[in-house]
Image (cartoon, rainbow, N blue to C red):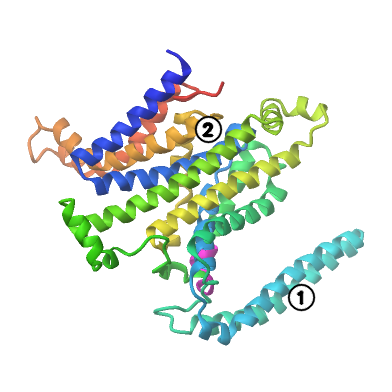
Amino acid sequence: MSDMMRKSLLFGAMALLIIGEGVFVSWNSALFILNFGLISAILALGVNLQWGFAGLFNVGIMGFVALGGLGVVLASMPPVGEAWSAGGARVIAGLLVGAASVVAAVFTYKRLAGRARILGTIGVLLVGFFVYRGVFDPAVQAIEAVNPAGTGYLGGLGLPVLLAWPIGGVLAAGAAWLVGKTALGLRSDYLAIATLGIAEIIIAVMKNEDWLARGVKNVVGLPRPMPYEIDLQQSERFAGVAQSLGIDPVTASTLYVKLGYSVLFTAVLVLIFAAAQLALHSPWGRMMRAIRDNEVAAEAMGKDVTRRHLQIFVLGSAVCGIAGAMMTTLDGQLTPGSYQPLRYTFLIWVMVIVGGSGNNLGAVLGGFLIFYLYTKVEVWGPDIMAFVTAGMADDNALKIHLIDSAAHMKLLSMGVILLLVLRFSPRGLIPEK
């Protein structure tokens, strides 16, 4: 079978699965899988840039996804005027003091030597810390006291939500640059531990700093690029078109909105995929693969390995940030408690490995396939367990335990799928050439 035929059959089968979901279950469910499959494919492309192109083992993916979601809040939500009046300027002043303290500590460390260097750096950091807390803490308390049930945070810039997606990517890229400057010199296993810890720190900050994005109280009612379903249902023109097609206006409004998101997400995926393909087949892409395969040889040829690793780490994290912004927009709310680094990072890695590490088409296929299975196994699990235990008595302890555990089949299934692919197609369904 030719390579083109294999790819066509795999993507055709994936399309049939989604269409079958629409025909035999509901088109609402099919479009839900399609939309999150598109976001998953973008996430998988971002990870494939880092791992497939450069061999960087980043386990902090959810931290950059969360920053993308935060970017939507900071960019698209309207500013809270009362909160800005209460302490907005002082919060900015406190953050500037904190940044200046770090810069002063670095300057002191470079200018002094011996014991004076250590004592001077510690002294600058201690003074800066207390000044920072003295300015920052009262401002935060004043902001969080402003209508804490409804706001209690500064809000955003009130920009169009589509602009928030690249802003989310820029925010994730900025954080990735800071992380990369400190962590990319580590060996791959230590890099994984460091990035996982950094992701936990990012999410912990988002959960606890209410002034930034309401913490665990969540930001709801985010602006959206598509109209609200209730507005469509109240439109006589839309209701008339829906009824002429034999569709209930309520169902039609939901399908219209989800289909609109599908078009937007497809456009973003095509743009990122095209850019990734151009990068892959460029001299830069060949250089990155050479560095991945043999860093020592690439360095001997005059390549700056650390700098190139930083480039690809920032680019991949930016793509993950864009996907996180899209996910938050689709959900309509920012919920920091839902970002679970270890659990969802594993799922994204399964997408890349199953699809084919180092192959952009494989990453896209893996994103769609694994999200589809992850969603459907939750539905199939109870039926499978009921079938397996059909011959057991209703009061059998094993039967009760298996049926009660059916909800956990999602993670078990992902592990089984990963093992099967690694056994029978270790380079993925669409391997790298």
11 and 259: which one is in front?
Answer: 259
Residue 127 badge:
1
Residue 17 percent coordinates (x, y): 29, 33
The residue at the point 18 percent across, 38 percent down is 24
Which is closer to the viewer, label 1 or label 2? 2
Residue 370 percent coordinates (x, y): 38, 36
Seen in the picture, residue 331 relative to 187 is either above or below; the reply is below
The residue at the point 29 percent across, 68 percent down is 231
**Residue holding disc 2:** 360
Looking at the image, residue 327 sits to the left or right of residue 398; the answer is right
Residue 282 percent coordinates (x, y): 67, 31
Give the quarter of the image for residue 136.
bottom right
Looking at the image, residue 337 sits to the left or right of residue 185; the answer is left
Seen in the picture, residue 280 relative to 35 is either above or below; the reply is above
Residue 359 percent coordinates (x, y): 53, 29
Q: What is the three-letter code of the residue carrying label 1?
A: Val
